[in-house]
Image (tube, rainbow, N blue to C red):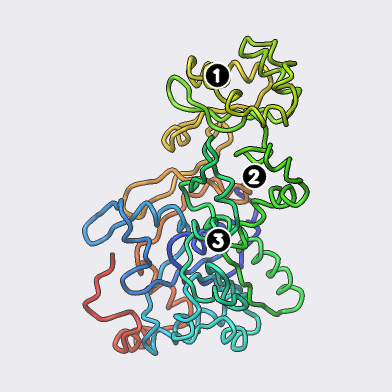
């Protein structure tokens, strides 16, 4: 973890972000944590996440939990990019930026004069990162389709692996594909910055929700190509991860438990007081347990349902079997392990409140700072002055509708 006196690795890097919801904002937030100057350009009404409930309100201002999770440390300016004045300011920002991050659809970007290829021609130095469901080019019939994290997850095959004990696919319940795409974009920008440093040139980086999920299932993709039909049939619903493996009921909730080799199976049998099952020919080897999975799952849950999560954690930890209680989000926020790791930091919500949120897991951030969520258009004057606009020019831009209609209230 860097000391307060150390410069953060992205200090001096300028990023312009035109984005909404999760994937692109998460990439921009990581860069802000790591020292980059990130200017968030929003429409006059604010990006979509600002209006997602639940929200906290203070007078005309409000902050949503959805927005709060992905936008700390940025500065906000509201621009009407349908107006010439708004586009003028946007181009001024891009002319001095190292990188531009967006997850706006390519068609909409083209109508605003911000299509990635156009920008690459106009600003050869600029790293342009566009995150879409399926790609802004070379996507065939998928080009232009609406994309959500869960859609990319489904197409990648990952949802087929998120199964209940009966083998039915279950959506994971959170925006895994969005965060995977945000992390992919973040890594791609860091590599492109190195190239930019060497050559002075930028590039267009085409990140998709669907492709960003493929590395998550790389082992499964290798397994399915190697396994013969008998092995596939015997693998059952957990796709070779081990038996027993997955989520199991306890007295007071659920645990995750993983027995992923035959030696561990014998340790498991000792731990549950059934050592004779360790060498039972029905269960001794993985493929045997897979073939008799229903019986193994019943043996497992007969034991787990008789104990609390804490008791099961202690029992299986002593047997050196991977185990953890399935925590609620609030329990995760309050967890002692994460407190020890300093895995969370307090973020000023911009309205006098605060949020406890995960750190940049690389630990490249300043632990002595308290980042703030930007109110919509909060930094307009500050940004415009930084980029050389005086009072008269700001008045002209306002008159031209660069910041939206005069009666549009900020939120």
For the residues marked 1 and 2, what is the alpha-carbon distance in whole angstroms? 34 Å
Marks 1,2: beta carbons within 8 A:
no
**In terms of sequence position, does the residue under pointer 1 or pointer 2 come before the other?**
2
Say which residue label 2 marks: 1
Is disc 1 in contact with disc 3, using a CB cutoff of under 8 Å?
no
Tell me which residue sits at (61%, 13%) in the image: 272
Callout 2 crowding tier (Cα within 10 Å): few <14, some 14–19, many ≥20: few
Q: Name the residue at 60% across, 48% down.
A: 4
User: Does dot 2 land on a helix, a strand or a loop?
Assistant: loop
| Closer to the eye: label 3 or 2 | 3
Asked which secondary structure carries label 1, the reply is helix
Q: Secondary structure at mark 3?
A: helix
Furthest-front residue in this view: 230
User: Tag 3: Cα neighbours inside 10 Å, few (<14), some, or many (≥20)?
Assistant: many
Q: Is residue 30 above or below residue 301?
A: below
Is 237 left or right of 251, judged from the image as shown?
Answer: right
Q: Going from the N terminus, do you reach mark 1 or mark 3 first?
A: 3
User: Which quarter of the figure is the C terminus placed in?
Assistant: bottom left
- Image quadrant where one finds the N terminus: top right
Question: Label 1 belongs to which residue?
Answer: 312
Q: Earlier in the sequence, mark 3 or mark 2?
A: 2
Q: Residue 362's x, y, as percent?
A: 63, 49
Number of the label disc, if any, that sits on residue 304 = none
Q: CA distance from mark 3 to mark 2?
A: 20 Å
Single out the mark in the foreground, 1 or 3.
1
Front residue of 207/289: it is 289
Of the numbered discs in the image, which one, if any, rests on residue 27? 3
Residue 409 locus on image (x, y percent): 24, 71
Q: Is residue 145 above or below residue 302?
A: below
């Amino acid at each position: 973890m860097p000391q307060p006196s150390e410069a953060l690795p992205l200090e001096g890097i300028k990023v312009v972000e035109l984005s909404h919801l999760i994937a692109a904002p998460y990439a921009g937030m990581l860069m802000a944590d790591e020292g980059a100057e990130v200017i968030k350009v929003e429409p006059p009404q604010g990006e979509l996440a600002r209006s997602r409930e639940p929200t906290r309100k203070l007078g005309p201002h409000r902050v949503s939990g959805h927005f709060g999770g992905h936008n700390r440390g940025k500065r906000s300016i509201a621009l009407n990019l349908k107006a010439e004045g708004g586009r003028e300011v946007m181009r001024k920002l891009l002319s001095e930026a190292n990188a531009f991050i967006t997850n706006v659809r390519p068609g909409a970007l083209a109508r605003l004069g911000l299509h990635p290829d156009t920008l690459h021609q106009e600003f050869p130095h600029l790293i342009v990162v566009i995150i879409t469901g399926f790609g802004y080019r070379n996507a065939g019939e998928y080009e232009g389709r609406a994309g959500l994290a869960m859609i990319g997850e489904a197409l990648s095959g990952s949802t087929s692996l998120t199964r209940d004990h009966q083998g039915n696919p279950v959506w994971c319940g959170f925006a895994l594909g969005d965060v995977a795409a945000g992390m992919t974009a973040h890594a791609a920008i860091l590599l492109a910055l190195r190239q930019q440093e060497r050559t002075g040139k930028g590039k267009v980086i085409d990140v998709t929700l669907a492709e960003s999920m493929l590395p998550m299932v790389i082992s499964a993709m290798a397994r399915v190509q190697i396994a013969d039909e008998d092995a596939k049939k015997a693998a059952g619903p957990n796709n070779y991860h081990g038996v027993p493996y997955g989520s199991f009921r306890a007295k007071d909730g659920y645990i995750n438990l993983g027995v992923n080799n035959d030696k561990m199976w014998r340790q498991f049998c000792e731990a549950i007081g059934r050592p004779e099952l360790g060498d039972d020919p029905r269960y001794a080897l993985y493929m045997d347990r897979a073939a008799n999975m229903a019986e193994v799952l019943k043996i497992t849950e007969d034991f787990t349902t008789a104990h609390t999560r804490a008791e099961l954690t202690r029992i299986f930890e002593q047997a050196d079997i991977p185990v953890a209680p399935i925590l609620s989000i609030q329990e995760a926020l309050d967890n002692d392990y994460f407190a020890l790791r300093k895995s969370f930091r307090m973020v000023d919500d911009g309205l006098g409140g605060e949020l406890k949120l995960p750190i940049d897991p690389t630990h490249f951030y300043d632990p002595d700072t308290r980042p703030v969520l930007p109110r919509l258009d909060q930094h307009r004057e500050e940004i415009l002055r930084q980029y050389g606009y005086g009072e008269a020019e700001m008045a002209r831009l306002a008159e031209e509708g660069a910041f939206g209609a005069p009666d549009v209230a900020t939120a």
